């Protein structure tokens, strides 16, 4: 059996068939480029290719599509892309997510913990937050998603109502990240701060900023965020 298999592999190798199979790097590159080129059909195709090649869905999101979004941001800064392209890039990423998201789910296992999450007041960016939500769900967390433009009062109300283990906040703008401090202060004032762990994220967020405003952690991406939340729940 082993001999037959190695014969087959060698035959395929000689025929060049194996070499024609795109590598993981190539597929992730296709995903990145499809986002940069605002190519909805291309992103769907590359997402399907990623899944059929056995690339983990989270990797396709973080190392493929999110990398493309970074480039879109740079193009916007350089004046090469305008708001219309930013919107299209967001829509393109959402299409990719519809293919990848079902492959991130792990089923009905016991909840790992409860997370209240939202994008802070004044900020409408939700693609990154939604990636975090998807990966937290895949790790069996119960999620209360407050959406975008969420005020301190709404966070406080949601914590009172749902008694979560973790509060997660997202901000993509330097003008809205400052809202996070107000939300932490509001939780303190309501006597809820000690009952929850707080994690923050988004492009302008750093661990130093988290420390400065009294959050428990900052994550550079959704994978790191889920790892931190999972660690917290283990130590609870
Ligand atoms: C798409 C986009 C938009 C879309 C948003 C669509 C949507 N539904 O979200 C639209 C067109 C609406 C938009 C609007 C604006 N945008 Co915009 N946008 C972007 C862009 C290109 C990509 C953001 C994105 O989705 N990235 C992909 C995701 C996957 O990455 P992410 O959000 O960073 O999230 C990851 C991590 O940060 C982390 N994470 C995020 N949140 C959280 C939370 C937690 C708890 C954890 C653990 C982790 C985590 O995990 C995620 C996945 O790994 C960025 C450029 C960039 N490179 O960030 C500009 C950018 C953020 N936008 C910018 C600007 C200026 C604007 C506008 C003001 C433009 C305008 N003139 O109107 C408006 C503001 C609207 C508002 N009030 O919010 C600037 C911000 C500059 C600044 N320093 O503040 C950027 C950086 C572009 C630039 N280079 O100038 N934008």
Image (spheres, rainbow, N blue to C red):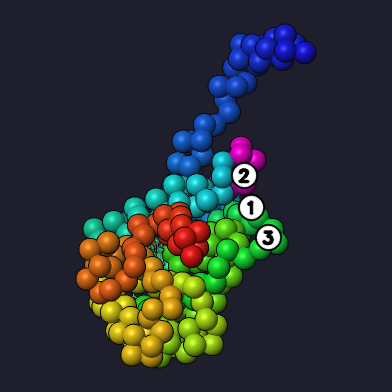
For disc 1, the marked residue is: 103
| Quarter of the image where ligand 1 sits | bottom left
Residue at x 38%, y 88% (from the top left corner): 191
The answer to whether mark 1 and mark 2 are in CB contact below 8 A is yes
**Which quadrant would residue 10 be assigned to in this image?**
top right
> Label 2: how many residues lie within 10 Å, few (<14), some (14-19) or many (20+)?
some
> N-terminal of the two: label 1 or label 3?
1
What is the distance, in whole Å, between disc 1 and disc 2 at their CAs? 8 Å
Give the secondary structure at mark 3.
Answer: loop
Give the x, y percent position of residue 37. 43, 52
- Residue 177 is covered by the magenta coloring: no
Residue at x 47%, y 60% (from the top left corner): 235
For disc 3, the marked residue is: 109
* Image position of 52 (left or right of 158): right
| Residue sitting farthest toward the right | 1
Give the x, y percent position of residue 189. 33, 90
């Amino acid at each position: 059996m082993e001999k037959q298999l190695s014969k087959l592999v060698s035959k395929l190798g000689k025929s060049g068939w194996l070499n024609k199979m795109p590598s993981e790097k190539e597929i992730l590159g296709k995903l990145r480029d499809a986002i940069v080129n605002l190519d909805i059909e291309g992103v769907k195709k590359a997402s399907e290719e990623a899944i059929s090649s056995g690339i983990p869905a989270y990797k396709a999101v973080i190392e493929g599509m999110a990398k493309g979004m970074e480039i879109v941001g740079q193009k916007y800064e350089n004046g090469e892309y305008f708001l219309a392209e930013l919107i299209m890039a967001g829509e393109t990423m959402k299409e990719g997510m519809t293919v990848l998201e079902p492959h991130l789910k792990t089923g009905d296992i016991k909840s790992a913990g409860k997370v209240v999450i939202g994008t802070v007041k004044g900020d409408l960016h939700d693609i990154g937050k939604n990636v975090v939500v998807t990966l937290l769900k895949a790790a069996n967390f119960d999620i209360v998603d407050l959406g975008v433009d969420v005020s301190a009062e709404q966070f406080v109300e949601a914590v009172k109502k749902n008694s979560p283990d973790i509060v997660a906040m997202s901000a993509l703008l330097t003008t809205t990240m400052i809202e996070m401090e107000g939300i932490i202060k509001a939780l303190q004032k309501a006597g809820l701060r000690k009952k929850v762990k707080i994690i923050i994220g988004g492009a302008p967020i750093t661990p130093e900023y988290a420390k400065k405003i009294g959050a428990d952690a900052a994550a550079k991406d959704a994978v790191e965020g889920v790892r931190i939340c999972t660690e917290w729940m283990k130590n609870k």
